Amino acid sequence: MGKSNKRKATGGGKRPGKKKAGGADFSEDELEEASVACPILLQAIDGLLWDFFWFGEECTAEFDDAHLAWSGTFESNTSTAHGEYQDRLRAIHLRKQGWSKADIAKDVGRSERFVARWWQLEPLAVPRPPGVHQYLATTMAGGKQADRTHMWRGVEVLRGFFTDTAGLYDEIVSGFTAWKQGASETKDFRTASYFLRYDREGKMKMMTMKSASYQRSVVPRLDLLVQKIHQKVGIQDPDHGAAMYWFSDGDASVGSHRHVFWSARVALGAERIMMVDKVPILMQEGDLIVIGPQRHGVPTMPEISEGSLRISVPFTPQKRDSKHVHQAPSAQTEDAEEEDDERWYPVQEDADWEDAEDANPTDDGGGGLQGLQILMDMGFDADASRSALQLCGDVEQAIEALTGGFAELLGTSAEGDVDEADADMDAGDAVLARKLQMEELQRESPDQLQQQFDEYQKLLDVDDAEKAWDGYGDLMHNSFRRANLNLDMLGAQTIYSLGVAAQTEKQFFELLSLHSVRVVYDFRPTDYRDEVRCQQPHFEIRAFKSNCRQRGIHYRHVAVGRETAWGTLKHLQSDEVQHILVELVWRAKHHGRTAFLGQEEDWRADGRLVVAEELEKHGHAVQHVRSEGSLERHTVGVEIPDFLLQEESRLRKVHAQRKAGELHRPEKSAVNRSLESVARSLATEKTQVDVGAELRDAENQTDLVRAQKRMVRLQMSESKKEAGLSKKELVAVPTHIAREAASIREKVEAKQKEKLQSKAVESAQASYAASSSHETAAELAEASRAAPAAASAAASAAYPKAETAGRRSRWSQAAGPAGPAGPAGAGADADTTTETKEPGSELRPEGASARETAETASRSRWDRRRERREET
C-alpha cells in the first residue's frame, strides 16, 4: 500500500563518495564497516525516496530493496550518554556472570580502564551521565531507585512477520468503534509523570492519532496476530492484552517519546516511517519491530493519503544470563544469526534537548476500566492493579509501580482496609442495615433508584479522581480526572494571594511563614519571549524556585495572562488556566495552605484580581496578604480596571505591529552613552549565568525548549555588546547553544542586509521618479514661452504623473490650468479681461526667465544627486 506515493531518487546534487544513511552522511569506508553490523541503515543512492517532517523540519529518507528485505537486530541509543550508561550497567552484569575484564571490554566495545572503573559497583550506585533522565534510573512510584540493568535492549526488525493481512486494516478500523483522541503530553524528566501540552493561547493540544484497547473475538484474524506476538516475545498468559493506534492518514503522527517497558509492534495498512532514536525505519504491512527504552515516534508524511495501524503489545523485560541481555532475540534468519555476534554503536549527538516533542500514546483514561483491564491482561493481580492506578493515575506509571517491587504492597493494602472495616462492624448490625436498605429500596420507584445510583456513582468517581493523583506532573493530565474534577467539585477552600513587588527575599518568606503557606503557585505573566519581568533578582524563576525548594515549599510557575495568550481575561477562559486553578484548589485541600503570586503589591492593580474573582464565584475564599502581613478578604464584584479590560486589544495591536516590523527598540539617551555610564558598566560586577545548569533545571521538554531559546537569546545579545559592557556573563555554554545562536545571528544579519538593500532600491526609484518630474516641468516651461495654451494643456496632463510618482515638483505646486478667463463676476467692469499667466511665473524670481529658472532647478537636481552619492 502507498506504492504510488513513492518517488525515485535521482541522486542529483549529492556529494561524491557520500551516501545518505539514517539522515546522516557517511564515507564509503564507514558504510562498508557499518554494513556488517547494521545493514538496515544502508540506503542506496538510487533507492526509493520518502519525505517526512520530524521536529518541525522537512527530512528525506531513501530506502532500497535491501532495507525492505532486511531482518535482524541492531543496537540503538538516543545519545552517547545513554550508550555509556548502558555499558556501565552491562559491565556490572557481566562481571556478576563471571566474565573477565578483557572479555567485558571486548563485548561492550570499551577499554579495560572503563570496565575497571564501573564493574565493581552496584547498579544503584552507578551515576547518570548528563542527558540521561532521572526516571531511567529510579522508579515512578515513590522516587525509589531500581535496578535498570535489564531494561536496556536492542532493536529487532522482522519483515513479513504476519502474512494474512489482506483487508485486515479495514476490518479492525470498522470493527472497533471506541477510537478516541488523547491529549498531547510531555514527560517529567525526574518522575516520568506527565504534563499537558497547550498552544500559545492556552488551548489543550490533542494528538493526531487515535487509540483503542484490544478486545478478543471482535476480529478473529486480529486474535491470531496478537497470539503470534505473544509467542514471539515469550508471553505465556493468553489473556495478556494489547493496544491499537490508528493513523488515519499521513498527517496523523506521534511525537518522539520513550517507555521504561518493552513493546512489540506490528504494522498494518499503508507503509509509514518509524523513527527509533534518530534512525528511520520503513514499516510495511505485516512487519514486526521490538524495542526497549529507545525514543521512538511516527513522523508526519504528507504524501500518504491512506491509513495505517500499529498493534502494540507491552511487556516487561525478562532477566537473561547470556551476554545478549541488552539485545533483542535474534531473528530466525541466516543473516540475523550471522550478525548476532557483530556489534555496532551508532554515533549520536550528545544533546537531547532538541527533541521538541514528547507524547504519551498509552493514555487510555488512566484509572478507568480499560486501564485496569490492560494491567490484568499483563498478568497483574486485580486488587494490586486497581491500587496502582489509584496511586499513579496512569497505566504506564502503574506498570512501573507493579514491576518495581510494590505489587504485594499494593495488592494487600486494599484488602487490609476492607478486613479492618469488616472487623469493626458487628455482624448483627450488618444484617439489620441490609434489611433496612432493602425496605427503603422497595418503597422507591425505579427512576428514583436509578437517579440515586447515578448520583452515588458520580460522587464515587469524583472521590476516585481526587485521590488518584500523587502530586507529580499535572493533576488534569488524566482524562478521567478531567471528566470528574472542576472548581465546584472540591469543596470550599481558602487560598492566599501575594504580590512580589519590590520586597526583599527575607520579607517575602517571612510573610509565607507568618501564614504557614507551604505551596506557592507563581502566576506572574511573561512577555512575548516567555520571560518574566521582575524588579529583584531573587524573584527570577530559577532563583525563586531554588529558594522555595531549600525551605521545603512546593513551587510551580504558570504564566497566567501572558502576552501570547492575549492577557489575563482572555487567558482565564482557556483550558490551561482552568486546569491549573483546579490543581491550585486541590493543593489547598490536600497539602495545606496554598498561595498564588502576582506581580504588583496592590491586588487591585494586578492580574490577581481576575483570578480571585474566578475562585470566589465558585465558592472559594481568597485572602489577600498585605506587605505588613495583614489579610484582606476578597469580595465578589470588584470593578475590573481598564488596563485589564483593554489588555487583549492592546496586545493584539502590538503583535500586529511587531509582525509588520513597525516596532523599534528605543534609542539610548545621551546619558546612557556618556563616559560616566560606560565607566559604570565596566566597574559593575557581571552576573554569571550557568547555561548548563539552566538547561538541567528544566522539568520537562516544554521547559527545556523554553530554556534553550532563552539561552540562545542571551548568547546573541551578549555577543553584540563590546567587551566589558555586557551585564551578564555566560559560562558553561554547550556547543549546540553557541551554534544555534550563531546560526540565528547570521539569519538576522542577512535579513537586515536585505532590508537595507530594499530601502536603497526604493530610494533610487523615488529619486528617478522625482528627477523625471523635474525634467518634464522644465521642458513645459521652455515650451510655454512659444505656445502658452499648448503648454498649459501639457502641464495639466503631466502634473498628475508627477504626483503619482510620489513626489510633486516645485513647478506642479504653482502651475495650474491656464486659459481664457471666465465671465466677469458681479460688479466687475465688462471691458476688463483676465490676464493669462505663464506656468511657474508665481515661483519665478523677479526678472528671471523661464529658461533661467529651469536651469537653476536642473543644477540643484544634479547637486542633490551628487550629495546623495557621497552619502551612500
Image (cartoon, rainbow, N blue to C red):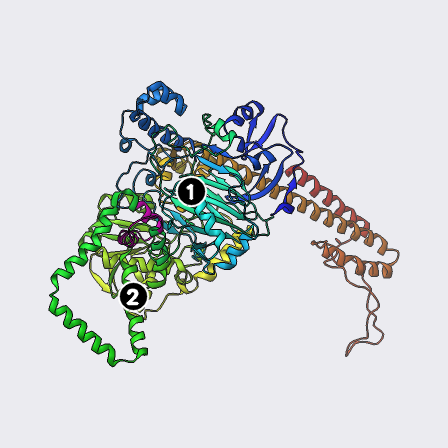
Secondary structure category for the residue under label 1:
helix
Above/below status of 145 relative to 647: above
Left or right position of 138 against 695? left
Above/below status of 844 relative to 823: above
Above/below status of 225 relative to 151: below
Which residue bears the numbered disc 2?
Answer: 489
Please state the horizontal and vertical placement of residue 813, each as a whole percent of the image.
72, 58
User: Which label lies toward us, 1 or 2?
Assistant: 1
Of the two numbered discs 1 and 2 on the same chain, state the one appearing first in sequence: 1
Q: What amino acid type is highlighted by mark number 2?
A: Met
Question: Which quarter of the picture shows residue 679?
Answer: top left
**Front residue of 539 and 331:** 331
Which residue bears the numbered disc 1?
Answer: 231
Residue at position x 41%, y 65% in the image: 645
Which contiguous range is marked in magenta? 377-400
Please state the horizontal and vertical placement of residue 109, each as a whole percent of the image.
41, 23
Please state the horizontal and vertical placement of residue 805, each as a whole percent of the image.
72, 53
User: Which secondary structure class fits the magenta region best?
Assistant: helix
Disc 2 packing (10 Å; few <14; some 14–19; many ≥20) = some
Left or right position of 437 against 867? left
The reply to whether residue 176 is in sight is yes
Query: Which residue in the rendered view is the most extreme toward the right?
Result: 786
**Front residue of 629 and 398:** 398
